[in-house]
Amino acid sequence: MMLILSGTTEGRMLAAELAERDIPYIATTVTEYGGELLLKTVEGTGAELKVGALQKTSLKQLIEEKKIRGIIDATHPYASKITWMAYRQAKASKIPYLRWNRPGLSEEEKDGCIAAANYEEAAKELAAQPGAWLMTTGSNHLDVFCRRVPVHRMVVRVMPFPEVLSKCFQLGFNPKQIIAQQGPFSYAMNKLHLSEYNLAGIVTKDSGDIGGVREKIKAAADLRLKTILIQRPVEPESLKAENLEQFREFLLLIQ
């Protein structure tokens, strides 16, 4: 039995690959929405689906009870907590661990962006900048920015879920400051949002092509606006794969 830590497009792709090879697995996702998407892949394959955040104890228990033979970490590049927890637990349980690597921006592509090591640093950078900005970092860390930056200086682009909108309202955002729409967004849409709201720049993460980061940076650059780019967190020095061929090689190691 394999364990896939999912919640991303790549996670669903890897789950489908396991199903095609008749390799039993458990797939996990944090959100109900992620679970619904993953269910379409898991359904009919005999695989199991677990929705909800894993903690250290529950992960250890899952590995022991289900006799997990290997962990495939296909979580988001910025989900560092679960990545490090899974890596350490795999070592403790003496089972293989594979990190799916989503390629990010090159140093050349980052050139011209204001680099921030984390959300706190990004909030400090934003506080020092003039004008209103487009926030495209999701809803989980909006409170970090709200502690340093007046709410009226931000327009947030978030997923259109009731709980997300409720959080935005609780933080003080009004409906005119909320773009509730699922991405990724095209170059034209990014440019439209930046122009229509008369914004000074965009705050984003290096989420790779799937996250549409290049389209965001290019739209801002062409409008001569600034980009605050939150850098990827440090990851474990582990076995990695970024294409199906490499993933299949990993599967051969554990069979």
Image (cartoon, rainbow, N blue to C red):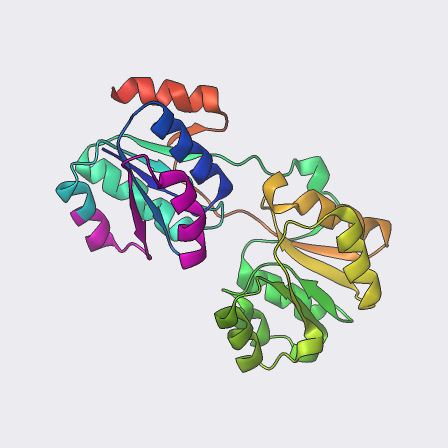
Q: Is residue 150 left or right of residue 236?
A: right
- How far across and how far down the image is residue 113, in percent? 72, 50
Picture residue at 69% right of the left edge, 74% below the top: 177
Q: Nearer the viewer, residue 232 or 16?
A: 16
31 over 74 or under it: above or below: below
Number of numbered discs on residues: 0
**Residue 100: percent from the left, percent from the top?**
44, 34
Is 61 on the left-hand or right-hand side of 167? left
**Can you say whether 169 is above or below 157 in the image?**
below
Give how far across and how far down residue 65 sits, in percent. Answer: 13, 43
Above or below for 57 versus 141: above
Q: Is residue 253 visible to us here?
A: yes
Residue 46 among those drawn in magenta: yes
Region in magenta: 32-61
* Residue 169 falls within the magenta-colored stretch: no
> Where 184 falls versus 179 (above or below)?
above
Place of residue 72 in the rendered image (x, y in percent of width and height, measured from the top left): 35, 35
Q: Residue at x 57, y 65 (%)?
A: 160
Q: Residue at x 35, y 46 (%)?
A: 84
Residue occupying the far front of the picture: 44
Give the side of residue 67 with respect to residue 166, left or right: left
Q: Quadrant of residue 111?
A: top right
Of residues 219 and 122, the one drawn nearer to the viewer in this rendering: 219
The quarter of the displayed image where residue 5 is located: top left
